[in-house]
């Protein structure tokens, strides 16, 4: 039987964090969810509040935290450009001070700690697909730098705590992940397209729509994070977690239109600054070290995600499509 652990999930009321809390509770662990509710919400974890093994604390990770735990998943950080660019100084602080505080906590209580890093550490890459050995091509002074460089610095801190203090660390580099509980207003491509399609509004595709992304369904991603935490101390990463199957933005838009049965048309807009043209994970390390690869097809994942957004429309949280 698996041993019950006390596990801290920072950013636990966010999109990924809420699924992670759910998964860990399901495995019989005690979960402390820490969140300042900047982009997350109680609503994401409301179904867990009655669980006696679940505790939620309103706290900003840029300040120190004192709790007794066995493992820490450090997910606190706004992940979508609209939110991380809203207060870029706070974004860098969340990544950097947040990492220092959580690493300090892990050191004090001798906890294992996993960092939710990102494919953004590769910036606008010159190699495809990206392997973990690639050092990236990031603009350090652009509008995305608060997030990209904050996450890069967090990785540096994790490695320094490992080298200097022999802390048990894990770094997962997460690629685009989607699923239920994404915020309708977060400007991420999957949620954007779904909301536009459900409202029969034009689907806004940037550039020519030929730039590609790979999309990982949330359940697959959470499984990868948990597997990584369960590895021995020699597995520290970084390990790419994402779906290597690439789709162009136009293909994604057309699939969303088809599944929702929407009357939306596609509208092409200028490409934002520093928007990467292509991103695709090489997941060879995850396959080897974690025996992990995504299982959910884009169509299956979209069907579940669209059902969630349809629920938001029927509950009045999202505006329904205008009548013809
Ligand atoms: N979803 C993706 O595609 C993706 C891709 C790469 C990396 N990631 C990483 O995974 C993590 C979770 O992302 P997500 O998609 O669930 O985003 P999210 O915005 O839904 O979740 C982030 C959570 O962190 C909380 N938070 C933000 N600043 C905080 C602070 N200072 N103190 C405490 N809590 C704070 C937010 O309120 C939110 O609940 C992030 O670290 C993100 O960088 C996500």
Image: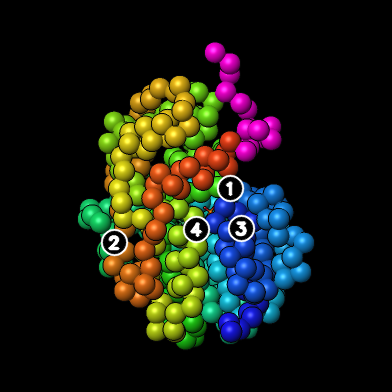
Residue contact at pointers 3 and 4, CB within 8 angstroms: no
- Location of residue 49 with respect to 2 vertically, above or below: above
| The stretch drawn in magenta includes residue 320 | yes
Task: Identify the mark at residue 219; answer none if there is no mark.
Answer: 4
Residue beneath disc 1 = 181
Q: State the CA–CA distance, disc 2 to disc 3.
A: 26 Å
Residue beneath disc 3 = 18
Task: Kindly give the residue lying farthest to the top in the view shown.
Answer: 324
Residue contact at pointers 2 and 4, CB within 8 angstroms: no
Residue beneath disc 2 = 282
Q: State the CA–CA distance, disc 3 to disc 4.
A: 11 Å
Residue drawn at point x = 64 percent, y = 56 percent = 13
Choose the circle earlier in sequence order: 2 or 4: 4
Q: Quadrant of the N terminus?
A: bottom right
Question: How far across and how far down the image is residue 45, in percent?
Answer: 68, 55
Q: Badge 3 local density, few (<14 within 10 Å), some, or many (20+)?
A: many
Badge 2 marks a residue whose secondary structure is loop
Tell me where residue 17 sits by quadrant: bottom right
- What's the magenta region? 311-324
Question: How far across and how far down the image is residue 234, in percent?
Answer: 39, 84
Choose the circle earlier in sequence order: 3 or 1: 3
Choose the circle earlier in sequence order: 2 or 3: 3
Q: Badge 4 local density, few (<14 within 10 Å), some, or many (20+)?
A: some
Badge 1 marks a residue whose secondary structure is loop
């Amino acid at each position: 039987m698996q041993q019950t652990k006390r596990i801290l999930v920072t950013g636990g009321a966010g999109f990924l964090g809420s699924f992670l809390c759910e998964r860990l509770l399901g495995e019989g662990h005690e979960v402390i969810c820490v969140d300042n509710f900047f982009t997350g919400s109680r609503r994401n974890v409301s179904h867990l509040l009655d669980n006696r093994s679940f505790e939620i604390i309103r706290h900003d990770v840029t300040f120190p935290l004192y709790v007794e735990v066995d493992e820490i998943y450090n997910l606190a950080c706004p992940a979508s450009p609209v939110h991380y660019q809203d207060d870029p100084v706070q974004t860098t602080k969340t990544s950097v001070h947040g990492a220092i505080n959580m690493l300090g906590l892990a050191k004090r209580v001798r906890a294992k700690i996993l960092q939710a890093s990102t494919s953004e550490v590769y910036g606008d890459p010159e190699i495809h697909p990206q392997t973990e050995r690639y050092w990236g091509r990031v603009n350090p002074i652009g509008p995305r730098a608060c997030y990209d460089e904050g996450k890069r610095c967090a990785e540096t801190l994790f490695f320094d705590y490992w080298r200097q203090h022999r802390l048990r660390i894990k770094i997962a580099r997460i690629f685009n992940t989607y699923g239920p509980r994404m915020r309708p207003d977060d400007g991420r491509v999957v949620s954007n397209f779904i909301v536009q399609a459900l409202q029969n509004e034009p689907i806004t595709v940037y550039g020519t729509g030929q730039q590609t992304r790979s999309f990982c369904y949330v359940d697959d991603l959470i499984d990868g994070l948990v597997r990584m935490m369960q590895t021995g101390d020699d597995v520290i990463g970084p390990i790419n977690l994402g779906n290597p199957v690439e789709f162009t933005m136009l293909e994604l838009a057309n699939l969303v239109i088809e599944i929702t049965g929407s009357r939306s048309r596609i509208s092409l807009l200028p490409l934002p600054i520093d928007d990467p043209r292509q991103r695709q994970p090489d997941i060879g390390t995850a396959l080897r070290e974690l025996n992990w690869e995504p299982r959910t097809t884009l169509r299956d994942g979209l069907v579940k995600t669209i059902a969630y957004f349809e629920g938001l429309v029927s509950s009045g949280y999202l505006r329904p499509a205008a009548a013809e």
